[in-house]
Amino acid sequence: MNTIDKIDCSLIKIKLNKPFVTALHEVDSVQAVKVKVILDNGLSAIGSGTPNEMVTGDSLKGMLDIITNIISPKIMGNSLDNWNNLIDELQNSVEGNYPSKAALEIALFDLRSQLFKTSLTTLLGDKDNLPVKTDYTISIGSNQEMIKNAKEKIKQGFTSLKIKVGEREYYDDVKLIENLSESLTDNITFRVDVNQGWTVKEAIEAANEWKSKNIKIDFIEQPVTRYDLYGMKEVTENSPYPIMADESVFSLKDAINVIEAHACDLINIKLMKTGGLSVAESINKIAEAFGIKCMIGCMIESPISIAAAVDFASTHSNVVYADLDSIFMIDNKNLEFKKDELLPMQNGRWE
């Protein structure tokens, strides 16, 4: 009983309201693989994974192939009663391919909560299921365009804005944050995401320049290349703002490495990087043990995986930030799911 009987895959494509531009790529739609896992007792659940060739190195075609031909045969017939063995089998079925693993894990965790006749938040949680407040990421454009977009999001109720830098000249990036700070209301905080785009010297100089002007910044994310932990450490030691590791942390081993190197103040956990909820849980626990707070972030994902990320954030006290804004970038007219079921947010907050 409670064994995996069938796994179906399909594609999700949902148009965005407008293209989303970062230093790494431009995206005009959510593209994800949806999986449906069916047990021999008739219970079923869905999950989804979003590839990102620039971050995780995955593609839609590759995900379909890996899930169908590699992972599914290895977990088919396994019982959820042997939970730890099942998750180990899934995580060790293939190297990398984190979005594929995440899609299946999200479905499996849902099924497990059904078997226990409880909610996923109860299954995951170490605290009450509280509202989760997300920031909104302003797409890269001219300073005028970004200021205009930022003002629109503030009117919609967002109080934290993530600003993508690292694509243009360094001094233009520094000036952009200053222009935004001068143009927006005082109650707005910024989260500056460099996407590995700066040198150590540039990151330290920018942080101290902004601090001298009293710009409200929650953290600076991944200022230097993911492999340069010594550089991350130097920035962390010399920045007046907290430094967050993102691309430097995919796995539990990565998290241990950045913690041992004292290379960050914060860690950005993304289910599409970790391969799902189980590794996300492990990373959060080790971070918490060393006094490092976490954020739950996302790619341009479907509502299915965003919902799982919200559940994770709302039930872990060490997760103090959320960057789950892709749900607000979707063109709802083309959404294939019921809005009442999957978009329970108002003004940047899940109620």
Image (spheres, grey):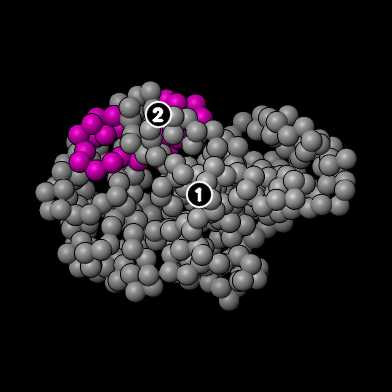
Disc number placed over residue 263 in the picture, else none: none
Front position in the image: 165 or 241: 241
Look at 38% across and 23% down and name the residue there.
260
Give the magenta range.
231-257
Q: Secondary structure at mark 1?
A: helix
Residue 150: give x, y in percent of width and height: 31, 67
Would residue 195 be found to the left or right of residue 269 on screen? left
> Could one spot residue 8 in this view of the protein?
no
Location of residue 140 with respect to 321 vertically, above or below: below
Residue 239 within the segment the image draws in magenta: yes
Front position in the image: 76 or 314: 314
- Residue 340 picture quarter: bottom right
- The amino acid at mark 1 is Ala
Residue picked out by circle 1: 313
Disc number placed over residue 290 in the picture, else none: 2
Crowding near the residue tagged with mark 2, few <14, some 14–19, many ≥20 C-alpha atoms within 10 Å: few
Residue 150 within the segment the image draws in magenta: no
Q: Secondary structure at mark 2?
A: loop
- The amino acid at mark 2 is Phe
Look at 60% across and 44% down and name the residue there.
124
> Could one spot residue 216 in this view of the protein?
yes
Which circle's residue, 1 or 2, is located before the other in the chain? 2
Give the position of the N terminus as an image quadrant. Answer: top right
Would residue 290 be found to the left or right of residue 304 on screen? left
